[in-house]
Image (cartoon, rainbow, N blue to C red):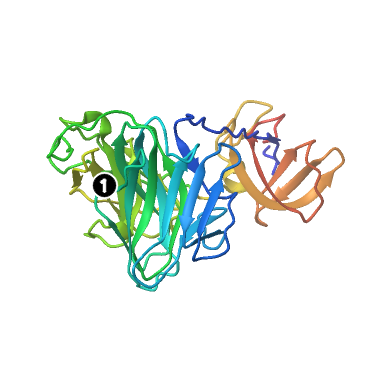
Amino acid sequence: MKNNSSRFSVFLIAIFLTFPLISSADITENFDGWTDGSYGTASNWTNPGPGYMWETYNTMCDPQNARSGNAIRLNDDAAPANEYLEYQGLDGNGKDGGVGTITFWHRTWDGDGSAIEFKIQKNVNGAGWVDVGSSVVVDPFNTTYVEFSRDVNDSSDNIKIRVTAVQDLERLLIDDFTITDYSGACNPDTTAPDWTVSGVANLVVTDPVTTGDLDLDWDDATDADNPTTIKYAVYRDTSTGFTPAVGNRIVTGLTASAYADSGLVDGTTYYYRIEVYDCAAQTRNNTDEGSGVPTAPVADSIYSVQFNNTTQGTSPDCYSSPRDAEVGVTLTGIVTAYKAGNNYTFADASGSWDGVYVYDNSHPCTIGDSITITAEVDEYFGLT
């Protein structure tokens, strides 16, 4: 005879955090240890850990609108624009070991539509500042952090790097700055990387059903002149047929042909495009737009664990749970009875098959508690 109470074997999951090891030649800076509360002057800071030296002019560094911790904020000022953020190396003379790629995240202060433009510059051995590529026009209405990446590919020592304002009618926030080591020469190149069928990345967007997430996967592109320097950027919009632009770019500098997007709104359709580029700044956008709709996982119910009045098992486990031996089942309910030794029943509804008996000697509770457990379903002497 099926009993309406059940046994649930509760287990705990230990989470171990691991942190990537960064080569001593790579620079990573989040500016969290730097506080600068005034515009209009030059400011110098040395990160007390790795010893990285930075200089700014007409900026502030504080938590306001930071991506995390603190962020650098370039002032909005009258022309000519004079704000900059400068990396000066460990000795004030610049980075040794060459510079590969610089990457950082940026956004406008309040998205009021005022023009912002910046450029990347390098100074090798004190010979003077030289622009690296063209200047970048920031979407003046965007208040979401966007990742920016620029290949420098210079093998010299003593390289200083600057982010310099070109137009500064609005404030620009910069956070989470990375400078990688030089990894190889960039060959002369006039052709952008491409896929087997030109422009077709075979972009696939799937929903992992994990609340606000979508997974993107596409084919690897190839490049005849600089095959090892291929990178990707991902663009996202809520309108089909959109044009990739700085304002809808969500990530750049990817070396793998896959990306996990997060922080999305369940039930909303998102459209994606992929840009592929190489160290010579030859770029191409895919033509096969992908789309997906993120959804939340469907909650398990106690009824789904309990109900079975048709399939008889073998004594003593008569009418076993249809989910017997399933691991990782998560249920939420209200404690309805408690027994000394921390065994208890809880239910998520008031009908038949909606309660479950739990063997748990580790987590005390009282009647009326709202609890969520993750456990293995198990038949135990005729009880589930």
Q: Is residue 199 left or right of residue 321?
A: left
Quadrant of the image occupied by residue 256: top left
Query: Does 76 appear above or below 307?
Result: below
Seen at 50% across and 62% down, the residue is: 41
Using the rendered image of the protein, determine whether residue 270 is visible from the camera's viewpoint: no
Estimate the x, y position of residue 69 in percent, counting from the top left: 57, 53
Q: Is residue 187 left or right of residue 31?
A: left
Query: Does 201 appear above or below 146?
Result: above
Query: Dot 1, how many residues are within 10 Å of its Cα: few (below 14), some (14-19), or many (20+)?
Result: many
- Report which residue position mark 1 lands on: 274
Query: Does 219 appear above or below 110?
Result: above
Helix, strand or loop for disc 1: strand
Classify the position of the C terminus by image quarter: top right
Quadrant of the image occupied by residue 157: top left
Residue sitting at the far right: 340
Classify the position of the N terminus by image quarter: top right
Seen at 34% across and 44% down, the residue is: 123
* Total numbered circles: 1
Using the rendered image of the protein, determine whether residue 352 is visible from the camera's viewpoint: yes
Estimate the x, y position of residue 39 in percent, counting from the top left: 51, 65
Name the residue nearer the viewer: 203 or 361: 203
Q: Is residue 303 left or right of residue 199?
A: right
Question: Residue flagged by tag 1: what amino acid is it?
Answer: Ile
Name the residue nearer the viewer: 149 or 333: 149
